[in-house]
Image (cartoon, rainbow, N blue to C red):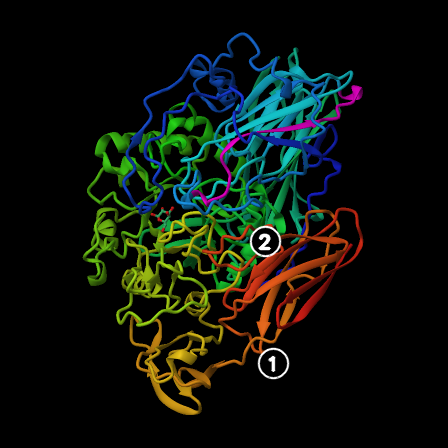
Amino acid sequence: MRKKFVFVLILICSVSFAFGQNREKIDINEGWRFFRYENNPDSLIYDERPAVFDKNDVKDADTRATLQNHGNASNKSLKMYILPTANEFIKDKNKHYERPDGNPGKDFPFVKNDFNDSDWQYIDLPHDWAIDKPFYTEENAIVGGGMGRLPVQGVAWYRRKIDIPKSDSGKEIYLDIDGAMSYAMVWLNGNLVGGWPYGYNSFRLNLTPFVNFEGDNQLAIRLDNPTNSSRWYPGAGIYRNVWLVKTSPVHVAHWGTFIKTENISEKSATITISIDIDNNSTKNQDVEILTDIYRLDNDLKISGNKVATFPKQNIVIEAREKSKIRNTVNIKNPLLWGVYSQQEQNMYLAINRLFINNKLIDTYETRFGIRDIKFDAEKGLLINGEKIRIQGVNQHHDLGALGAAFNLRAAERQLEMLRELGCNAIRLAHNPPAPELLELTDRMGFLVIDEIFDCWEKGKNPLDFHLIFPDWYEADIRAFIRRDKNHPSIIAWSFGNEVGEQYTDEPGAAVAWKLAALVKDEDSTRPTTASMNFAKPDMPFPQTMDIISLNYQGEGIRDAAAYSHLKGIKTPPLYRAFHQKFPDKMIVSSETASALSSRGTYFFPVFAGNSAPVSEDSGGNDTLRQVSAYELYTSPFGSSADKVFAMQDNHPFVAGEFVWTGWDHLGEPTPYYSSRSSYCGIIDLAGFKKDRFYLYQSRWRPELPIVHILPHWNWESRTGQITPVHIFTSGDEAELFLNGKSLGKKKKDKFEYRLRWDSVVYEPGILKAVAYKDGKQWAIHEVKTTGIPVKIALSADRNVIDADGKDISFVTVRILDSDGNLVPNADNKIWFEISGTGEIVATDNGNPADMISFASKERSAFGGLALVIMRGKKGKKGEMKLTARSERLDSGSVIISSR
Ligand code: GAL
């Protein structure tokens, strides 16, 4: 049964809120001071880095990863002071790091309480220092296309006073940073507390030993973002939320609960909870633990009475030790968590209460879902007994023109559009997300492959994670799983993407076994995987995986005729070979397609086959830096959607696919590295649908009447010339008409996913497609030759937003002709103005080659569209009016209220 989905946005307000008695989680995102060195940064380095000789980021993504770190630790570096932060996540106590004597950096002005930072920039977090800056457009820029041509590089500092009243003395005070890019090192009151180099993981620091309960407390955080460290735009800064957590000395440990659900039937489910409890006090403590379970409604609020209570437990925890306890209870008639839209998304909440001498000392909450998952080598994925085909996409962490700075509404909008597409699964390429994203996937019913690394010992970029892999892999993997393991949406842990270790047989497999063992040690309930674009069935590497995740190998790499001239990995289609070798393992394509296109842009002639690599004479244009949206063109190792669908349908045991990608992302602008963002999304960077959207939607939502014509029909200069027309439909046949004249009816053959009329001779007018399903009329689409642009129309996705300084509205700008038709090739330059209670945060148009800064209030339309992202000023209730003007066009406006 499908349930109507009601989503109420929970906004993270910057007020302190009780998180249960004796535990407080305080949002400290507001009021930071920020400073970035333009040149000559300080010498408080985490570690020396190797000199970079190969700065070239124009490489095929599947280039073999070979770089290896040979150790550069210098005694000037602060690494030995930071590594102890990892101890919590290193199981073997003998391998724990001991902090050396001393307090590096203590004399450095920026860490001192009395340093005057009043001339530093005033900012709120989450913050991405690069996103609103001008793009580097020169050749050999310091940050090239791969990393997005924005100034992410360099060292920066964040400072903020934190309020810790005298009444907190005796409490434990923690700093929780959900993500800081990168090499974070934190000082409190001039003392180096610790840090975390990997920019995608969340981490906690215990501030307690350095807190001044009598006065001022000054935080100073240093970040250091190297160039040549990423294959995509990493973002820069403290780009996720930051919290202060206060607990009593005895409390549930950080990410300290793990809830397993088993023996699931309609009548009951067994819930097992394990709870880690820290006793940071100096005496042994006799602790009583009570745990109740409640049902949550769609807004994640407790609904109704408790549904179960675990047996009461007592435990004595020794001074300065931690203990783990387990407990089990049955829930009657459990309501299950499942996938949208086939199933419901029911969630529960476990509340632990800890008592000492009958006094409540800690309350800790864990959301979870009850679901049964089977990974079947023949049937694919079964959730709660029902087969679910994986209709997935890969998603990068950036939010387009907002950069890496996490914004809940922007993330929700991405998922809303993916739902509309019929997508039900997301692979987080290739790093852990903001924690709030997983709350969204839980609520909205997406399946998630949570992924941590793009490389291990063998790097892909001179200064990427491989430099710190030996020191940090265990801590990073354990931290990643501990944070996320209670999310029902996560179905598998991926500990690598296309790693160089695939190529080294036994030594590479040994690394994979080691990492897989860590994953299992943290969570034995979910399968492990790592995506393979090279490892073959007979190699030792795939044996290390519970799920066989193939990148492009299933449909074959550079193996069709149009690809035969290319250099690089060549692979025949391998689904069957993997299936034969691993008859008990589920196979999924963790990356398919890598098809490329620029929304609304079409080049001629059109490739006659169903998949071809982009080149100057086939689908691409080096001067414009655009790829034709006939949706037939791909990266050198990719395949069009059509080719992938055919291969998937030929191999029904494959559980499904994750398309590369759902949305365009910043950086990695294959094949045009002088651009700023990628061409591989089904949806462009601004959130506008490419033609491909309808190709996937037709397949993923077969019940929805869809027919979609491409290209647009404004081709004045092509009159009399052949201009192919293609149709995507969820029907099985369609008839095409040009100016009322039938150009014939066509039916999809087996393994055919589009209908093509490749010899249409262009004449202006109206193209109309009538689709049929099972012989009955199913859907109609018309495309018209429009008049010239005459006006601008604005429409907001939400006309009422919260005045909390975070909530945003996405305004679509359309260039229309006098009849109100969108002019599909309009590129008019538009000026935006705002009055009232709001501000313009960014503008975009989804054009990967548009090098105008996202902060600009001038933006040319691309394919007739542009986007303005608006935000209400904090605390200012009322109305804001956005006006768009352009030469020779009637201006447009929209009013949004903030409340
Ligand atoms: C894959 C890689 C992705 C991305 C993609 C580009 O090989 O895993 O991260 O680079 O290619 O098309």
**Which quadrant does the N terminus fall into?**
bottom right
Mark 1 secondary-structure assignment: loop
User: Residue 315 sits in which quadrant?
Assistant: top right
- Indicate which disc residue 412 carries: 2
> Would the CB of label 1 be found within 8 Å of ligand 1?
no
Q: Amino acid at mark 1?
A: Ser
Considering only order in the chain, which callout, 1 or 2, is on the residue closer to the N terminus? Answer: 2
User: Residue 869 sits in which quadrant?
Assistant: bottom right
Label 1 neighbour load within 10 Å: few <14, some 14-19, many 20+:
few
Asked if the stretch drawn in magenta spans residue 156, the answer is yes
Q: Is residue 882 left or right of residue 760?
A: right
Residue 811: give x, y in percent of width and height: 63, 61
Q: Amino acid at mark 2?
A: Glu
Residue 722: give x, y in percent of width and height: 32, 80
Task: Work out whether residue 521 or residue 758 is closer to the camera in this orientation and state it.
Answer: 758
The residue labelled by disc 1 is: 818
Mark 2 secondary-structure assignment: helix
Q: Is residue 451 left or right of residue 102?
A: left
Asked if the stretch drawn in magenta spans residue 883, the answer is no
- Indicate which disc residue 283 carries: none
| Distance from Cα at disc 2 to Cα at disc 1 | 35 Å
Label 2–label 1 contact, CB within 8 A = no
Residue 827: give x, y in percent of width and height: 52, 67
Residue 232: give x, y in percent of width and height: 43, 44
Q: Is residue 275 visible?
A: no
Q: Which residues are magenta?
A: 147-168
